[in-house]
Structures are given as C-alpha cells and as structure tokens.
C-alpha cells in the first residue's frame, strides 16, 4: 500500500497526543468528537470533559476522507447566522445526512457514516494561515501562506511559498532554510510565532512519517493559541512497525463511495489477509463479458490494459485482480470458484459468449502445474454453468513446470467439453486477448 | 562505469537465501564463469563458517560471516552487495554497507515496503557516495554472460530459453520484476536478447531510476538499443525524455508505460504497484506514452504490439549493420540428478512405506518362512547382495566357530575398568569394543592378505616364506599354542570338510596348506590355525563370487573380517 489517508479526527488526535513534544511554545485544546449519529453525539455530551458540546456553538461536517466539504454544502456552521449551531441542531443535521445517500460534486456517491463535531471558532480572516508538507520527487516540500481557506488553490503560485527540504538535511539547516523562505507578507507581530510553528510542523510531519499533512486554515489566536480548523493527512503505512506507539491503533478508512464492496470482493480480501499469498479482486462490471484470472501484479495490469485497448467497449471488462505469491491449491480453487460463480450469473445481454482469460507471465518460483490444479478442480465444478453462458477459455502461462500445467488444464477442458486454447512462453503474454476477441466476433 | 557488471564481478550475499544463491551459481556454471559470483554470505545468526553449494555437479564451500564489515574485509574485491534483509532490517544493512567506503559499487535491495522516509534516506546517502542502489522491491538485474543477481530470469531453463546466457544487444529497464522475465523472453524471440537488464523496483522510492540505467546503457558499447517498460505514476519517464531531447541519449528507445487502463476508472482502483498511482495527469500512463512518442521514442499502440515493434527496430539495426548476428556460444549443462556428497547410506533405507535392507523390505527377510537366514541378512548388510547358499552357510559356520574370539587383554581390561566405575553392561561393553584395533589378533586379515599375495604372485611356498621373512613379520594365521599336526584342531577339520564338499574351489586354502607343510616340517605346531583358515577361505569365497582383486583388497584393508 504505502500512503494511506486517515480521518481528520485521527489527525487532530495525533497533534494533540504529541503537542507538548513538538509544539511546546503553543497551545492547542483538542476539542473534537467523531460520531456516527445524532444520538451518539447527544450521549457524548453527557460525558465529563465534553461539556463544551452543550456550552459552545458547534461546527459539524463529514469526516470521510473527501475534501471540498464546504463547496458540497456539507459543513454545518450556521442555523440562522454563523456560529449559532446548538447540539440539537447538529444532532438533527447528522441524522438527516445519514438517512439518505449523498452525491458529491465530483460524482462520488455513498452514504455518510462519520462526522466530526467541534466548537465554532470565532476569528477574523486575517488570522487564517495555510501550512502543509509532502514529498515531491525525492525531497520534502513545506508550503506556507498567509491566506488560508477554501480558495487557496486559486492563485496558488502567488499565494503560497514553497520550501524544498532535502531528505538528509540537518535540523539546524532546516530551521535556517524555513526562516529564510518564510512568506514575505507575514505580519510583524505573528512572524516569529508562525516561523517557529512552521519549523515545529515540519519536524512533526517528518518524525511521525506522514506522507502528506495539511492544515487549512490554521488559525493563530491570541496568546499562542492555535486552532486547527481543517486537516488532511496521509500516513506512510510501511512505517507502521516503527510508529506503533506514536500512532496508536489508527484506522485507514476506505474512500467515500468505495466502501460498498461486494460480498465476493470482501471474501477475497479476507482470504488475502489470512494468506501469505496475494489475492485481489475488484469487480468493474458484473455484467461484463471478459473475465480475467491473472497471476502476478504486473501481468494483471497489462491484461487489463490490453482488454481496454482491443475490446470495443471498456464495459466488456468485468473484473480486475490477481492471484500470486504462491497460493495453495485450496486458495487458488477458492479464487477460481469466486470468479466462475460471478461470471456465470448473467448471460451476455447481446447474446455473445463470454471470455475467460487465465493469464500470467513467466513465473519465477511458482509451480504452474500445482496452481493449475486448483483451477482444474474449480472447472470441474463449474463446467456446466460455464457452458451455459458460452465461455471460451484462453490460457497463457510460463515458468516452472508450465508444460505439465498447460497439458493438465487442456486435458481437463477436453474431458469436460469446455472450449479452451492453452499457450506457453512462445506466445506473447497478452496475445490471448487478441485471439479471444477475434475468435469471438 | 559503462557496464554494471562484468564476468569478474563478485558479490556478498546478505542473508543465506540458499535457493537464490544456488540459482546464481547454476548460472555461473552454465555461462562458464571462472569464479563463482558469490564471494561470501553474511548470515548474522549462523554459527557455521561455510555453506556447501553445487557448482555444476561438483560442490564448493562459500564462507559465512556474521557481519558485512567482516565479509568485506576478507573479500575486498566483492563490490556488489545483494541485500536480502527484510523490510525491517534492509535499511540498516544498506547504511552499514555504504559506510564501508570504497567497498561496494552496487547494492541491490529486495525487500518490499521499507518505510518511505528510510528508503529516501538510504537512496540519497548512496547517491552522495557514488553507490548505485538497485531496488528496493526488485528482483535485481543481469548482465547476460557475466553476472546475474539472485532470482532474476527465473529458472535456469527459462534463462537458457530467453538467451540470458550471453550478451545480446538490448538494454532493458523495467519497473516490474514479474514482467522483466516476460520482456527478456519477447526480446529473445523477436531480437537477439539483452546486453544488460535491470528491474528498478516497484516501490515509490527506488535507488536507481530509469534515467540512471539508460545513461549507463548509452555508454555501454554492447547496448545498441534500449527498452523502457514504465508504469502509471511518477514522473521518471520525463527525465528520459529530457535526456533524449538534450542529446545525452542517442540510441533508439522502445518505450511503454503499463496501466493505461486507469484512465477508464475515476479513482479507488489501485492498478499494480505501490508506486503506481497517478497524482496528476502527467503521471498517467497515457500522458507518458504520448510524451515519449512525441519525443521520438518507439511507442506501440498497445502493450500487445511490443513484440512487433521490437522486431522492427532490431531488423532495422541489423540491416544497417549496427547489430551483428550472434554466434551462439556453448553453454554447460547441469545434471538434473546431482547429489550432495554427504554420508549416504546405501545399505539400509528408512524412507518410504517400510524400511529396507538393500532395497528388500525387512518383512521379506525377517521371519523363518521367508527363507532368509542370518547369513543371508549379513550378506545383504555387509556385502550388499544375497550370497549363494554355500557362502551363506560358510559365513554362519565361521560365526559359530569364532563366537568366543575377541577378548584381547586391553579391551577386556577397559570393559572391566568401566564396569568397576559403576557403569551398566552396555557402556562397559562399548568401552571395551572401542579399544579394538590392530593389536587385536590381526591374524584373519593378515592371513587373507599375505596368502592371497603369495598365491596371486605365484610364489612357491619356499619363496613365500622367504618373502615373509624379508617383511620381518611372523606369518599371520600360522601356529597355535596347543594344537599341532598330531593333535589337530577339530574346528579346522570341520571347516575343511565343509569346504571340500560345498565350495566350488578353494585355491588360496590349497596354497596355504602347501605352505603349512613347509612350516610344520620345521615345528609341529606351526599349523594353519583357525584364524588363518577363515582368512584364506574368505578370499576363496570372494574369488568364487567374482569380486575383483581391488574389491577384495578393499574388504581386507577395511578390516571387514575382523572388526
């Protein structure tokens, strides 16, 4: 995986947890709650430490990784006028939002399930700043601006100061560099504080292995009080083993609209989690005509590419996925069962036959004959159903023991009365896609 | 450095990954390397000093060290480190290796999922010190005919099929390791194979990128054209475009970025590696393919058309004389049935359903109704075949005859001492048995040896006596304290009778008896005693069973008779 987004709430919790260590010269009162319903919000309001939910006016917004919530009218900050949202109004609003699916301006749609609720921070526009850090090429880049808010992307070049920080730069040099490149228009009374905060921010970003961290807007209040109004964060999850204590038990939600995985996708992803091998399945179009069962990550991509290139319509491609890393016969059979089941549920609406691509590059280690054993067992089970939807099967594979594997699977298909063509390394890896499409016309 | 590796390149392998190392050595043997490509192995938790591997059908020992600095000190010429540490340890291994200034020119890192910040730190540190890092998350690279990293190329059969055993004319750089094999296969079918190839690795941050490898290949005279197989995500391909535009790269490049599928789907579907996701339009496979095409690269319309474009470029370079036809060199084959030279028991075998004696299940020889006697089993276990009945019964007769033999003073004393120390019977017996050596009798072996010598060399009994006198040793198997011509040893009488009836012939016994005539004429008790009789008869038996002289000599020298 590598870079994974976390919730705004969790990002703020990380700030709070490490605040004293990194931002000793500033104050931050971590007043945020994450809830899934109005009732949950009402209940938390009874708890000690959360009296502010009843005492202050509130802001509520979905916390589900997508941005541009303001433009999507998904930030509740006013009932009649800004800063008058009470607990009840917020709770009702949340209940209203979870009751029906939401469609974003981007077209993504799904059901809202998580909301962050915070006090309304009364402030002036001149108190808003922008700060973020990420990796560009091989370097880190720190972005700073005296203009925070939703419109930062418009006129980015003029508004935002970039500081490129090489990976191996010493701390003292980083301090110097940030100081020397701070936004020129920082107000005199905030200049020192902002620079000092920016340096702290960068170290926090770096030491906690963030891949991306953005506060927009950051509000600098009186007495070195900082308010983090909005936050976006991605972690480098490969550093998870180093960050066990620092991150705690962090959650990586799936992107909004993507959480509705089918049962089959869930089953494969659970099997993947249990196995040392790699099993991946994404259903692109359940009615699709071309189904793939491809070994290996790189090969699965080139098969999908080639099908998209050579077929008349991208909707022909039913699924994307891979099985690799030496799955057991049982795991391979389960994977094949899942695909054969899915592809035999519907007949092609245009009355064409279906195509099954059992593809793969030349394996390094995997015993091809062994992995084919699981597929053959599955073919035996699904032969009748596969024939019903008029499946033509195209096989291509190389690697250890591939000759036996191809011979076995072809013999099985002949025995079962299934149409199959099987090829080895002498045939170009994706050429079976061309053959299958030309044959199927 | 115009070439990544040469035929002299040697590596230190971090982690004792036996199968990967063996694949390298098989490759070395196949391409006729003089020295193995692995100089040493770093195995921090192993206490062994060496590890055995095959080199062809022979075996070699590769030294093991506990740390990279130790290995480097002993092998200053090994300038490649193959780092097979896990994602947890790989970073520390690289940083330690870079510290050893002047040792490593190339470090390959196989681990996938090293924290990005650590990967960037080690990549940058290596770059600053002029060390090339291949990986992380890679199967490595190959200079066909010279040096191959670990598992790249797959099985030796695939390597031979893909002509990765000798230098071709293509420089190949891919991101994916899985498709590297596929590309070398295509190149061998449609052109003349590769001159140098690197899979740069699938992680987001890798040490050497496309441009690093292509610039080196530009200066490598063996490389006549290059193939770049990129992926959606990142902007590394644009650096190559810049190098072509500025004239730093002039050799033809065939290029393709996989992951064009991504354009059809909004977001959320991760196609391929960790590094493979486009954060901006120019990082899409489509945009990069277009940009490379516009810069004059050979870019096919689809991945599926790569073979034909390779053929086109190759044929063109061939017709222009840039590439010459390759005369295929001879390659050495490795036997499929090679065996390690450990101690192998060829007699009994406990693998499989039932344990066997020389291939015969024990249940077939154990009980009386099987028809196998104790002598039959002895012949199987000692001499690895079933002897005929006369020989088996002879062995049993000997066994019964000399069951009382053996208690020489030193052995008996040791047994007694051990017993008096309070040990049990078996321990005491073992103490005595371990004392058995040349001072114990020796007459059976000696008699067998010398009488056979005398007979085989046609010495007359007189000459034989002279010969033995010259050797300075009393004739083994001649003489007895009590028994004499007139007071014959009835055990010998019995043996002789059995032999005359059952043995097809007994030339050595006859010869010994001729000698006995001479010795007894000097002194009455210088008879062929029971040891001597058994010794010569064993030789007669073996001769009759058609063992050759060398085999019989081996039996005697090994002490098969006495011990």
Image (cartoon, grey):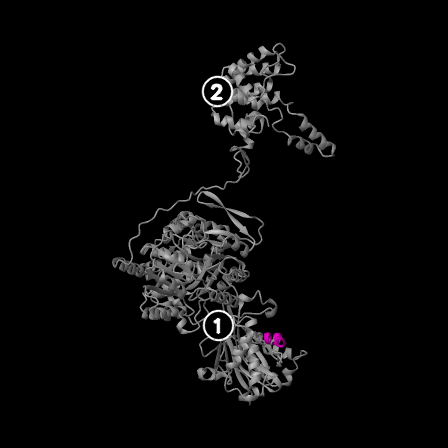
Q: Is residue A96 above or below residue A385?
A: below
| Picture quadrant of residue A293 | bottom left
Check if residue A17 falls in the magenta segment. Answer: yes
Left or right: residue B116 versus residue A298 is: right
- Callout 1: 10 Å neighbours few (<14), some, many (20+)? some
For the residues labelled 1 and 2, say whether their Cβ atoms are less than 8 Å apart: no
Q: Which mark is residue A44?
A: none
Q: Secondary structure at mark 1?
A: strand
x and y percentages locating residue B415 in the rendered image:
69, 30
x and y percentages locating residue B166 in the rendered image:
36, 52
Which residue lies under the disc numbered 1?
A: A139
- Callouts 1 and 2 in the same chain: no
| Residue A49 shows up from this direction | yes
Camera-near label (1 vs 2) is 2
x and y percentages locating residue B16 in the rendered image:
52, 52
Front-most of residues A323 and B39: B39
Report the magenta residues as a range.
A13-21
Which residue lies under the disc numbered 2?
A: B456
Residue at image x 56%, y 19%?
Answer: B469
Q: Secondary structure at mark 2?
A: helix
| Picture quadrant of residue B152 | bottom left
Check if residue B196 falls in the magenta segment. Answer: no
């Amino acid at each position: 995986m590598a870079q994974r987004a976390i919730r705004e709430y969790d990002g703020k919790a990380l700030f709070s947890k490490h605040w004293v260590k990194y931002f000793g010269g500033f104050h931050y009162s971590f007043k945020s709650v994450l809830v899934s319903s109005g009732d949950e919000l009402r209940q938390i309001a009874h708890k000690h430490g959360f009296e502010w939910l009843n005492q202050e006016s509130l802001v509520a917004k979905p916390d589900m990784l997508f941005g541009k919530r303001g433009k999507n009218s998904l930030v509740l900050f006013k009932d009649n006028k800004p800063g008058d949202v009470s607990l009840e109004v917020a709770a009702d609003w949340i209940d209203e939002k979870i009751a029906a699916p939401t469609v974003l301006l981007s077209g993504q749609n799904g059901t809202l399930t998580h909301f962050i609720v915070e006090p309304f921070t009364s402030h002036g526009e001149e108190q808003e700043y922008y700060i973020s850090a990420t990796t560009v090429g091989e370097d880190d880049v720190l972005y700073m601006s005296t203009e925070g808010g939703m419109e930062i992307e418009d006129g980015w070049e003029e508004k935002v100061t970039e500081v490129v920080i090489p990976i191996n730069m010493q701390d003292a040099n980083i301090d110097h560099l940030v100081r020397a490149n701070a936004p020129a228009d920082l107000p005199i009374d905030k200049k020192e504080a902002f620079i000092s905060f920016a340096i702290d921010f960068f170290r926090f970003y770096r030491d906690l292995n963030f891949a991306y961290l953005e506060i927009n807007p950051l509000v600098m209040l009186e007495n070195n009080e900082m308010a983090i109004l909005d936050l976006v964060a991605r972690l480098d999850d490969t550093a998870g083993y180093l960050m066990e204590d620092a991150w705690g038990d962090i959650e990586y939600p799936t992107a909004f609209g993507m959480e509705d995985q089918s049962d089959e996708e869930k089953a494969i992803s659970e099997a993947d989690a249990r196995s040392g091998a790699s099993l991946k399945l994404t259903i692109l179009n359940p009615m699709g005509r071309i189904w793939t069962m491809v070994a290996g990550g790189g090969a699965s991509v080139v098969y999908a590419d080639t099908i998209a290139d050579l077929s008349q319509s991208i909707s022909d491609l039913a699924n994307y996925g891979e099985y690799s890393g030496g799955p057991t016969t049982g795991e391979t059979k389960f994977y094949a069962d899942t695909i054969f089941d899915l592809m035999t549920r519907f007949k092609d609406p245009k009355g064409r036959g279906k195509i099954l691509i059992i593809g793969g590059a030349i394996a390094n280690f995997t015993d091809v004959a062994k992995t084919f054993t699981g597929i053959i067992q599955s073919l035996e089970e699904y032969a009748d159903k596969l024939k019903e939807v008029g499946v033509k099967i195209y096989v291509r594979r190389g690697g250890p023991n591939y000759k036996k594997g191809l011979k076995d699977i072809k013999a099985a298909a002949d025995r079962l009365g299934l149409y199959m063509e099987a090829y080895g390394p002498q045939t170009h890896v994706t050429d079976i896609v061309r053959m299958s499409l030309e044959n199927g016309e | 450095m115009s070439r990544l590796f040469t035929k002299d390149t040697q590596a230190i392998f971090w982690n004792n990954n036996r199968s990967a190392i063996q694949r390298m050595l098989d490759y070395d043997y196949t391409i006729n390397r003089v020295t193995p490509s692995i100089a040493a192995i770093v195995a921090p938790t192993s206490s062994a000093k060496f590890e055995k591997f095959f080199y062809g059908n022979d075996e070699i020992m590769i030294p093991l060290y506990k740390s990279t600095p130790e290995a480097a000190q002993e092998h200053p010429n090994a300038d490649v480190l193959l780092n097979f540490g896990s994602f947890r340890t790989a970073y520390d291994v690289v940083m330690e290796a870079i510290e050893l200034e002047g040792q490593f020119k190339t470090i390959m890192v196989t681990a996938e999922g090293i924290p990005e910040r650590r990967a960037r730190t080690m990549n940058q540190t290596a770059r600053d010190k002029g060390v090339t890092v291949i990986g992380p998350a890679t199967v490595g690279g190959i200079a066909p005919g010279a040096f191959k990293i670990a598992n790249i190329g797959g099985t030796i059969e695939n390597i031979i099929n893909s002509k990765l055993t000798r230098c071709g004319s293509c420089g190949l750089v891919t991101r994916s390791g899985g498709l590297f094999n596929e590309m070398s296969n295509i190149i061998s079918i449609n052109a003349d194979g590769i001159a140098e190839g690197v899979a740069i690795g699938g992680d987001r941050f890798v040490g050497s990128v496309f441009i690093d490898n292509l610039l080196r290949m530009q200066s490598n005279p063996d490389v006549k054209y290059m193939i770049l197989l990129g992926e959606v995500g990142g902007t590394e391909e644009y650096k190559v475009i810049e190098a072509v535009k500025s004239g730093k790269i002039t050799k033809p490049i065939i290029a393709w970025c996989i992951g064009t599928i991504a354009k059809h789907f909004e977001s959320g579907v991760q196609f391929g590696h960790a590094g493979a996701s486009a954060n901006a339009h120019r990082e899409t496979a489509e945009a990069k393919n277009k940009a490379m095409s516009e810069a004059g690269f050979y870019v096919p319309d689809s991945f599926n058309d790569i073979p034909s474009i390779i053929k086109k470029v190759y044929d063109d370079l061939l017709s222009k004389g840039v590439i010459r036809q390759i005369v295929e060199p001879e390659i050495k084959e490795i036997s499929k049935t090679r065996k390690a030279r450990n101690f192998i028991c060829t007699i009994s075998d406990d693998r499989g359903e039932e344990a066997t004696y020389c291939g015969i299940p024990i249940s077939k020889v154990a009980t009386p109704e099987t028809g196998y006697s104790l002598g039959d089993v002895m012949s199987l276990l000692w001499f690895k075949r079933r002897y005929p009945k006369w020989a088996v019964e002879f062995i049993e007769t000997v066994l019964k005859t000399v069951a009382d033999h053996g208690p020489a003073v030193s052995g008996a004393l040791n047994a007694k001492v051990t017993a008096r120390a309070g040990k049990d019977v078996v321990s005491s017996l073992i103490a005595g048995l371990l004392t058995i050596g040349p001072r114990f009798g020796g007459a059976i072996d000696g008699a067998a040896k010398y009488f056979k010598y005398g007979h085989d060399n046609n010495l007359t009994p007189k000459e034989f006596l002279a010969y033995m006198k010259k050797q300075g040793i009393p004739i083994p198997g001649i003489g007895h304290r009590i028994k004499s011509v007139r007071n014959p040893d009835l055990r010998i009488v019995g043996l002789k009778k059995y032999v005359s009836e059952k043995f097809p012939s007994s030339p050595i016994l006859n010869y010994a008896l001729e000698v006995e005539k001479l010795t007894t004429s000097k002194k009455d008790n210088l008879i062929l005693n029971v040891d001597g009789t058994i010794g010569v008869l064993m030789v007669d038996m073996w001769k009759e069973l058609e063992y050759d002289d060398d085999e019989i000599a081996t039996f005697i020298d090994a002490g098969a008779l006495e011990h």
